[in-house]
Image (tube, rainbow, N blue to C red):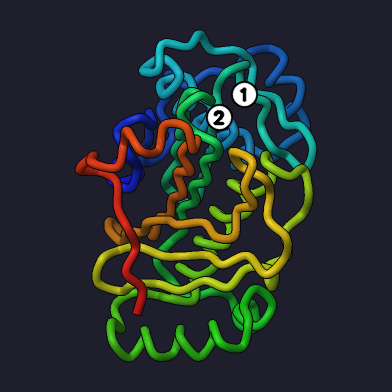
């Protein structure tokens, strides 16, 4: 599911459920020692995915310990992102000379808890959620909006080491092409010497899940990838 949302230069791995062969490094065990069983399972399985994705990239695995605000510490020369929700775990990695940032998120395809949409969205986003729900009612657009904002944050934080509030990015979805754009409402990070003003991403709904992904290439290599079949230019309604 996640792989279909990514360019060819990103490696990924996903599992539905918790594979029995998944194991933690002792340093990771120490981090999660006091956690409830469900947290231990998701923590272990998502790192199992990360190990597989790094292996596909040709990078030896090392303990992925949570750092500031829980962001995992990736090996040198690697950028990555992980996600887990009920019944699904995934990890995405890329070489840092190719990728400036990655952000992925998965959510159950079901409504947000009552009142949560107002907390995570702008008024104009809520209007668009209602319009999209009328257009394609089988997708829970409120939850998809939340997922996309999570992906934006995961791509943003390693570039800035700053919190990005839910109301500091305005998201728009193309309901047919499976793309979205997040316009930053605060000064963006410098990428390749230029201020980043927006993130572009992709989304999918399948298997009872919603997934969103952002893969920001390094500017120096963006031109060479422009002809790749897996790249895209969002067209937003």
- Residue depth check, mark 2 versus mark 1: number of the one nearer the observer: 2
Q: Tell which of 46 and 147 is nearer to you.
A: 147
Residue 129 in the image: state x and y as whole percent. Answer: 46, 83
The quadrant holding residue 28 is top right
Q: Could you say where residue 153 lies in the image, as x and y percent from the top left? A: 63, 53
Seen at 64% across and 23% down, the residue is 64
Q: Going by the image, does 35 lie left or right of 223?
A: right
Q: Which numbered disc covers residue 74?
A: 1
Q: Residue at x 40, y 75 (%)?
A: 140
The span from disc 2 to disc 1 (Cα, nearest Å) is 6 Å
Which circle's residue, 2 or 1, is located before the other in the chain? 1
* x 29%, y 78%: residue: 138
Q: Is residue 43 left or right of residue 142?
A: right
Above or below 27: residue 43 = below
Question: Is label 2 in a helix, a strand or a loop?
Answer: strand
Classed neighbour count for the residue bearing mark 2: other residues with Cα under 10 Å, few (<14), some (14–19), many (≥20)? many
Residue 198: quadrant of the picture: bottom right
Asked whether disc 2 touches disc 1, contact meaning CB atoms under 8 Å apart, the reply is yes
Above or below, 140 against 51 in this view is below
Image spot of residue 135 (x, y percent): 28, 87
Number of numbered labels in the structure image: 2
Q: Nearer the viewer, residue 134 or 40?
A: 134
Q: Residue at x 56, y 87 (%)?
A: 124
Identify the residue under disc 2: 79
Q: How many residues crowd mark 1 within 10 Å: few (<14), some (14–19), many (20+)?
A: many
């Amino acid at each position: 599911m996640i792989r279909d949302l990514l360019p060819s230069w990103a490696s990924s791995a996903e599992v539905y459920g918790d594979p029995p062969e998944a194991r933690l490094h002792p340093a990771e065990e120490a981090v999660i020692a006091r956690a409830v069983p469900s947290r231990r399972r998701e923590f272990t399985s998502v790192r199992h995915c990360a190990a597989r994705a790094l292996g596909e990239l040709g990078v030896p695995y090392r303990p992925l310990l949570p750092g500031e605000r829980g962001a995992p510490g990736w090996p040198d020369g690697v950028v990555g992102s992980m996600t887990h929700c009920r019944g699904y775990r995934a990890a995405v990695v890329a070489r840092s000379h190719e990728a400036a940032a990655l952000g992925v998120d998965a959510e159950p395809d079901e409504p947000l808890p009552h009142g949560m949409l107002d907390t995570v969205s702008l008024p104009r986003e809520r209007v668009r959620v209602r319009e999209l729900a009328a257009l394609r009612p089988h997708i829970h657009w409120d939850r998809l909006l939340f997922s996309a904002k999570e992906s934006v944050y995961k791509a943003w934080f390693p570039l800035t080491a700053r919190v990005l509030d839910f109301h500091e990015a305005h998201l728009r979805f193309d309901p047919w092409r499976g793309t979205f754009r997040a316009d930053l409402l605060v000064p963006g990070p410098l990428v390749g010497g230029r201020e980043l003003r927006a993130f572009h991403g992709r989304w999918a709904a399948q298997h009872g899940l919603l997934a969103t992904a952002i893969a920001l290439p390094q500017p120096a290599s963006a031109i060479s990838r422009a002809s790749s079949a897996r790249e895209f230019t969002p067209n937003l309604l």
